[in-house]
C-alpha cells in the first residue's frame, strides 16, 4: 500500500529555529516504572522499536498539565520550500539537564546500552557480542540524548505530513556526537480521549528483477499513554507521517539518541 496521494512527495522536515530561552522548571520524574519492568520490543528490525509503559499514566497526566503552561507556538500552515507540511503547536528548548535526567533516571540508559547483571562463565563473551550488536543497531556508541527537547501538541485537525527525520551533529558534554534515532514519548492516547494521530511508516518498494515491484504494507503505530517510539533517522530513515488527530489532544516529548562521532582514521 503506497502513501496517500497528498503525501506522495516526500520532504525533509527541519526543526524550526527558535531564539534561546531558559529551560522550564520541569516537574519531578516520579512516579517512575522500575527499570526491571521495562523492555525494548522490536517492531521492525533495525528500524523501529517500542518501550511500552515507559512512563506511568499519572506522570504523563502531570506532564500534560505542566506542558499546557508553556509558550507553545503554532507552526505555519504553509511550510518553507523543501519542508513537510506540519500543523501543530510546539515548544523547543535546549536543556542538557533535562535530557540527562530522561537518560539516566528513567531506566532508558540501561535499556539502550543493555546494562544488567552478568551471569555464568560466558557472561563476558555474551556482553561483548551484545555491545557490538547494539553499536551496529544504534549507529555507534550511545552516550545520551539530544539536549534539544521538543514538545508537540496536536489538536483536532492537526497532523504532520510525510517526511524524513535528519541526523544532526552537535556537542554533548564537550563530546562530538551525531543523532541516529528519533525518540518520541507519547503522553496521550485513546485512553485519554485522543483519537487518530497514529505514526505511520511507509517501507520502500522491493525491486525483484523480472517481477513487479512489491510494496509492503505501512507500519502503523497507534498511540499508547507513556509509550516510547524509537525509529532510525538520517540516511536510513523511513518515510513516515503523523496522521491527523480527529478528537482530543496528542502530546509528545521528542528528543534523539546521540552516538559518539568516530574519529576519522585519516585525521592527524
Image (cartoon, helix red, strand yellow):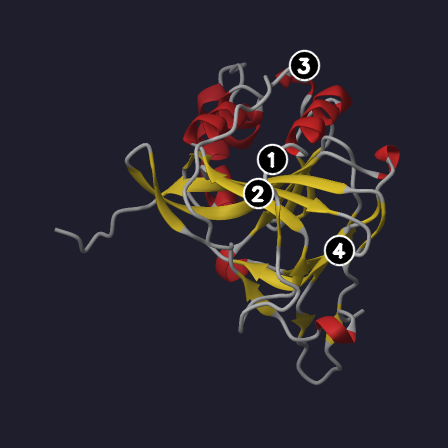
Mark in the foreground, 3 or 2: 2
Q: Nearer the viewer, residue 81 or 30?
A: 81
Which circle marks residue 91 in the picture?
2
Q: Nearer the viewer, mark 2 or mark 1?
A: 1
Name the residue carrying label 4. 158
Counting residues from the start of the chain, the first of labels 2 and 4 encountered is: 2
Q: Nearer the viewer, residue 39 or 180?
A: 180
What whole-number distance in Å separates the C-alpha atoms at marks 2 and 4? 16 Å
Q: What percent of the width, then of the height, locates residue 198?
A: 78, 50
- For marks 2 and 1, the one nearer the N-term is 1
Q: Secondary structure at mark 2?
A: strand
Crowd tier of the residue under label 3, counting other residues whose Cα lies within 10 Å: few below 14, some 14–19, many 20 or above: few
**Label 1 belongs to which residue?**
70
Measured in 3D between alpha carbons, the distance from the residue under mark 1 to the one under mark 4, in whole angstroms, is 19 Å
Q: Is residue 116 left or right of residue 8?
A: left
**Residue 256 can be seen, yes or no:** no
- The answer to whether the residues at label 2 and label 4 have Cβ atoms under 8 Å apart is no
Q: Residues within 10 Å of mark 2 (few under 14, many from 20)?
A: some
Mark 3: secondary structure: loop
Amino acid at each position: 500500500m503506497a502513501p496517500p496521494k497528498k503525501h506522495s512527495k516526500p520532504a525533509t522536515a527541519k526543526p524550526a529555529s527558535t531564539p534561546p530561552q531558559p529551560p522550564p522548571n520541569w516537574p519531578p520524574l516520579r512516579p517512575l516504572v522500575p527499570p526491571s519492568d521495562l523492555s525494548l520490543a522490536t517492531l521492525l528490525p533495525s528500524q523501529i522499536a517500542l518501550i511500552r509503559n515507559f512512563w506511568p499514566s499519572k506522570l504523563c497526566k502531570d506532564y500534560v498539565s505542566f506542558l499546557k503552561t508553556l509558550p507553545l507556538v503554532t507552526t505555519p500552515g504553509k511550510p518553507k520550500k523543501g519542508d513537510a507540511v506540519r500543523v501543530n503547536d510546539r515548544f523547543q528548548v535546549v536543556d542538557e539537564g533535562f535530557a540527562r535526567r530522561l537518560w539516566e533516571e528513567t531506566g532508558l540508559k540501561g535499556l539502550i546500552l543493555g546494562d544488567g547483571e552478568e551471569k555464568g562463565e560466558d557472561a563476558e563473551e555474551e556482553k561483548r557480542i551484545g555491545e557490538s550488536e547494539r553499536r551496529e543497531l544504534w549507529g555507534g556508541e550511545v552516550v545520551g540524548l539530544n539536549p534539544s527537547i521538543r514538545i508537540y501538541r496536536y489538536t483536532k485537525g492537526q497532523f504532520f505530513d510525510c517526511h524524513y527525520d535528519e541526523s544532526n551533529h552537535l556537542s554533548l558534554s564537550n563530546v562530538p556526537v551525531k543523532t541516529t534515532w528519533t525518540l518520541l514519548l507519547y503522553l496521550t492516547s485513546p485512553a485519554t480521549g485522543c483519537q487518530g494521530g497514529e505514526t505511520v511508516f511507509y517501507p520502500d518498494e522491493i525491486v525483484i528483477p523480472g517481477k513487479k515491484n512489491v510494496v509492503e504494507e505501512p507500519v502503523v503505530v497507534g498511540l499508547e499513554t507513556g509509550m516510547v517510539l524509537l525509529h532510525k533517522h538520517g540516511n536510513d530513515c523511513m518515510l513516515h507521517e503523523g496522521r491527523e488527530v480527529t478528537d482530543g489532544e496528542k502530546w509528545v516529548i521528542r528528543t534523539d539518541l546521540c552516538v559518539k562521532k568516530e574519529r576519522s582514521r585519516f585525521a592527524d
